[in-house]
């Protein structure tokens, strides 16, 4: 069911619709090197292939897990020959480009810069998070793809059910309840939707039925090996805690764990959230999150559910807790001051065994006016004062 032309692509109208960036590039007849950034099943590979076809370029695909620098050299050599003898442009599609090592990404640079190849990289990870080197990223135009919505997934399912040549040719039926269930399990991923649909058809056919029932879809979803948008789900999990929505936080926690995420990883994210988001709003959050991590490590959660109680408890506690992120923000403001302004000498009265130091336990009144920040930073505020703001 892969689209055969750009006009057949469902979704990504902001990139492919009339007047949209990728559409204008195709109409101009030339492609720059680019990065397609989006969740699984949003059409990155399909769009990369169709862009090459639309401008009459050769298409070569490299696999980041299997193809190293030697394979790249071979593709580049072929691209040079095609350009010299036929005047052909070669588009090299590199899926999950962030998995390439720094050395491999550096090997791409001269060929991208010289225009020997047009690189179309694809990634599910935020490109500015460090997985893609800055020199390579600076040579790529970044286009962000969105998860497919319900209407778009509904259209894709309808095409698959009706297409007599590449799809199911109306040999099976899918009622509205089963269709909504299928769309829900797909979670914005066209490839996932079609995989579950195909498995559900097989399950119904094994029972001699042409009508796909909700139970078929549920069993197909459980049996399928599904893609997992780790960065997206974990981000939603943390932001739900930060937004004090325990129900959403539990939903994303369950989503991650059902996809096979390591419970210890989720527990570590809770520890970070306890300090970053809850902070001084509820000092008991950090000990509880650490206890949940210890419980998961000691009890386990991969083969039984007992360790998950601790994760659920900590998740709800953190989501319901008052939030105060000022301590962490104040620290990073102080660190930025050190990095940008440099370090300053320690005041003489704060040095070890200083005779001019006044101990607050011995002289509370006298110590009140004692200076603790270095000279030149008197009165500097990193932490907001009650009822006010920091400088």
Image (cartoon, rainbow, N blue to C red):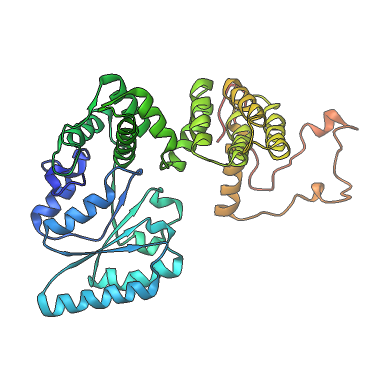
Q: Residue 14's spot in the image, x, y percent?
A: 20, 40
The answer to whether 145 appears left or right of 323 in the picture is left
Report the number of numbered marks. 0
Report whether residue 202 is seen.
yes
For this rendering, which residue is in front, 45 or 346? 45
Q: Residue 219's spot in the image, x, y percent?
A: 41, 30
Q: Residue 266's spot in the image, x, y percent?
A: 58, 37
Residue at 31% x, 73% y: name it: 110
Quadrant into which the C terminus falls: top right
For this rendering, which residue is in front, 104 or 163? 163
Q: Residue 390's spot in the image, x, y percent?
A: 57, 33
State whether residue 115 is above or below residue 270.
below
Say which quarter of the image contains residue 275: top right
Residue at 53% x, 35% y: name it: 257
Quadrant into which the N terminus falls: top left
Report whether residue 383 is seen.
no
Say which quarter of the image contains residue 121: bottom left
């Amino acid at each position: 069911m892969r689209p055969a032309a750009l006009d057949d692509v469902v979704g990504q109208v902001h990139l492919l619709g009339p007047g949209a960036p990728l559409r204008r590039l195709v109409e101009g007849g030339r492609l720059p090197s680019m990065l397609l950034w989006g969740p699984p099943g949003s059409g990155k590979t399909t769009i990369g292939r169709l862009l090459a076809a639309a401008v009459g370029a050769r298409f070569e695909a490299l696999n980041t897990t299997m193809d190293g620098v030697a394979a790249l050299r071979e593709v580049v050599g072929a691209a040079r020959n095609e350009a010299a003898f036929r005047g052909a442009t070669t588009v090299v599609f590199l899926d999950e480009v962030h998995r390439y090592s720094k050395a491999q990404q550096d090997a791409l640079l001269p060929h991208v810069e010289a225009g020997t190849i047009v690189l179309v990289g694809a990634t599910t990870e935020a490109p500015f998070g460090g997985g893609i080197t800055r020199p390579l990223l600076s040579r790529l135009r970044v286009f962000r793809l969105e998860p497919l919505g319900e209407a778009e997934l509904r259209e894709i399912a309808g095409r698959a059910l009706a297409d007599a040549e590449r799809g199911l040719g109306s040999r099976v039926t899918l009622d509205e309840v089963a269709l909504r269930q299928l769309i829900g399990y797909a979670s914005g991923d066209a490839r996932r939707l079609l995989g579950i649909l195909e498995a559900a058809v097989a399950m119904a056919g094994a029972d001699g039925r042409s009508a796909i029932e909700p139970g078929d879809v549920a069993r197909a979803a459980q049996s399928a090996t599904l893609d997992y948008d780790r960065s997206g789900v974990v981000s939603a999990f943390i932001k739900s805690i930060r937004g004090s929505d325990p129900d959403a936080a539990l939903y994303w926690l369950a989503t991650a764990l059902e996809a096979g995420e390591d419970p210890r990883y989720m527990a570590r994210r809770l520890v970070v959230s306890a300090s970053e988001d809850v902070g001084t709003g509820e000092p008991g959050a950090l000990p509880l999150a650490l206890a949940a991590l210890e419980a998961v490590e000691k009890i386990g959660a991969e083969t039984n559910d007992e360790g998950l109680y601790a994760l659920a408890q900590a998740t709800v506690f953190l989501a319901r807790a008052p939030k105060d992120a000022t301590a962490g923000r104040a620290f990073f403001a102080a660190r930025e001051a050190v990095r940008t302004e440099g370090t300053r000498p320690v005041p003489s009265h704060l040095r070890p065994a200083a005779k001019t130091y006044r101990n607050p336990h011995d002289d509370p009144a006298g110590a009140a006016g004692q200076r603790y920040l270095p000279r030149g930073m008197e009165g500097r505020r990193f932490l907001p004062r009650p009822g006010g703001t920091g400088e």
